[in-house]
Image (cartoon, grey):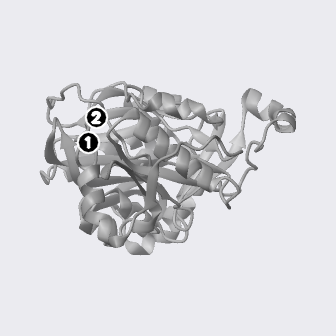
């Protein structure tokens, strides 16, 4: 069957709760490409895991012959833009089985997304494309006719840090959060108003949307009695998993040799990685970020986790702190996406919550 014939058979529609099992299967079949092929899974349920992206989420699917061959998510959440609170969009989880990647299926999917966008909930979206995913970068970032406008906003660095051995402690007044601390935690999170940063409230931290996250997962740093930083260690493995599907190229050939000299070794394929996210990081200074990160790192060495993942924009002054740790480097490109013409964006440093990607 030709690509054009296949395209004609595809229809787009909102996903239903009954599609959950098939959507989870689609994630297994459509890993992100590159030298390390990675699948981002949603077990045991697709929809609850997706709702962490925003209080309003729309999952839509492409079907051919009764089979789901593609899917994507549109989320809307309170977001800082130029220091003001707006309803900002986030586009994610775009998946399309290989045989439908040629032809017009993707373009038709974006036409369907444009129709959803007409509800007027937002004027601007953000999205992140894995830097190794050259096909997606060329296809989506090329601003082809009929597609929305993608504007590159720089790199997001998301290193996978090995919890290898403890590093020297940084003396500081740090304690775990309690439910009574939530007002102070939320105030600190919203203080800097970084570009594209989600806006938080006490409600959305405890309403169950952020699964497996509790006040005790936050660390709070005080200097002379003043709260100067917060940071959380968020274990999402009970509801979202990351699995290495394949190593290719030089990485695949040399992996057995590399593992002889590397600790921990490059992960096995088809097994969920054991990591947590460094999330909800808001600090008054680079040194405050360094202190909180070191505390969580040392606390986690020897735990059931082998890695932690942090995420910062390439212009974030805290980024050099991440280089203090043994790591496997991953990165993506941050884009803003608009359908109705450009939206003014000032030069504030972006902050993307890696745990919500």
Element marked by disc 1: strand
Q: Does 254 sit left or right of 216 as displayed? A: right
Element marked by disc 2: strand
Q: Residue furthest front?
A: 224
Pick the residue in front: 319 or 73.
319
Check the image and report above or below for 2 versus 318.
Answer: below
Where residue 90 sits in the image (x, y, percent)?
Answer: 30, 47
Q: Which residue matches tag 1? A: 125
* Residue plotted at (53% across, 63% down): 24
| Disc on res. 336 | 2
Where residue 169 sits in the image (x, y, percent)?
Answer: 59, 44
Pick the residue in front: 178 or 133.
178
Dividing the picture into quarters, in which one does residue 160 lie?
top right
CA gap between label 2 and label 1 equals 6 Å
Check the image and report above or below for 139 versus 291.
Answer: above
* Residue plotted at (35% across, 42% down): 283
| Disc on res. 27 | none
Dividing the picture into quarters, in which one does residue 241 lie?
bottom right
On the question of residue 83 being in view, the answer is yes
Check the image and report above or below for 60 versus 335.
Answer: below
| Between discs 2 and 1, the one toward the N terminus | 1
Where residue 334 sits in the image (x, y, percent)?
Answer: 37, 33
* Residue plotted at (50% across, 32% down): 321
Q: Quadrant of the N terminus?
A: top right
Where residue 176 sits in the image (x, y, percent)?
Answer: 44, 62
Q: Is the residue under label 1 in contact with that under label 2 (CB below 8 Å)?
A: yes
Total of numbered circles in the picture?
A: 2
């Amino acid at each position: 069957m030709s690509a054009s014939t296949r395209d004609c058979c595809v229809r787009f529609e909102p996903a239903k709760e009954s599609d959950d099992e098939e959507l989870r299967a689609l994630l297994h079949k459509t890993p992100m490409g590159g030298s390390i092929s990675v699948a981002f899974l949603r077990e045991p349920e697709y929809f609850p895991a997706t709702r962490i992206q925003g209080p309003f989420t729309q999952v839509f699917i492409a079907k051919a012959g009764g089979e789901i061959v593609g899917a994507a998510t549109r989320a809307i959440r309170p977001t800082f833009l130029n220091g003001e609170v707006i309803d900002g969009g986030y586009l994610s989880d775009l998946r399309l089985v290989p045989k439908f990647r040629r032809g017009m299926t993707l373009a038709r999917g974006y036409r369907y997304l444009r129709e959803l966008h007409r509800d007027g909930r937002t004027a601007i979206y953000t999205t992140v494309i894995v830097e190794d995913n050259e096909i997606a970068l060329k296809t989506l970032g090329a601003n082809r006719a009929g597609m929305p406008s993608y504007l590159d906003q720089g790199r997001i660095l998301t290193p996978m840090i090995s919890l290898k051995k403890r590093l020297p402690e940084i003396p500081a007044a740090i304690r775990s959060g309690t439910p009574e601390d939530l007002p102070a935690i939320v105030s600190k999170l919203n203080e800097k108003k970084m570009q594209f940063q989600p806006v938080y409230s006490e409600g959305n931290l405890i309403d169950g949307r952020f699964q497996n996250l509790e006040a005790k997962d936050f660390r709070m740093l005080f200097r002379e009695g003043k709260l100067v930083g917060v940071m959380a260690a968020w274990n999402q493995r009970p509801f979202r998993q990351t699995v290495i599907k394949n190593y290719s190229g030089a990485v695949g050939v040399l992996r057995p040799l590399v593992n002889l000299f590397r600790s921990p070794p490059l992960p096995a394929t088809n097994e969920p990685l054991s990591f947590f996210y460094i999330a909800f990081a808001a600090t008054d200074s680079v040194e405050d970020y360094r202190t909180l990160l070191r505390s969580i790192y040392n606390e986690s060495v020897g735990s059931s986790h082998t890695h932690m993942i942090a995420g910062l924009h390439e212009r974030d002054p805290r980024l050099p702190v991440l280089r203090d740790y043994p790591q496997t480097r991953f990165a993506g490109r941050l884009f803003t996406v608009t359908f109705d013409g450009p939206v003014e964006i000032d030069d504030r440093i972006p902050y993307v919550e890696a745990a919500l990607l």
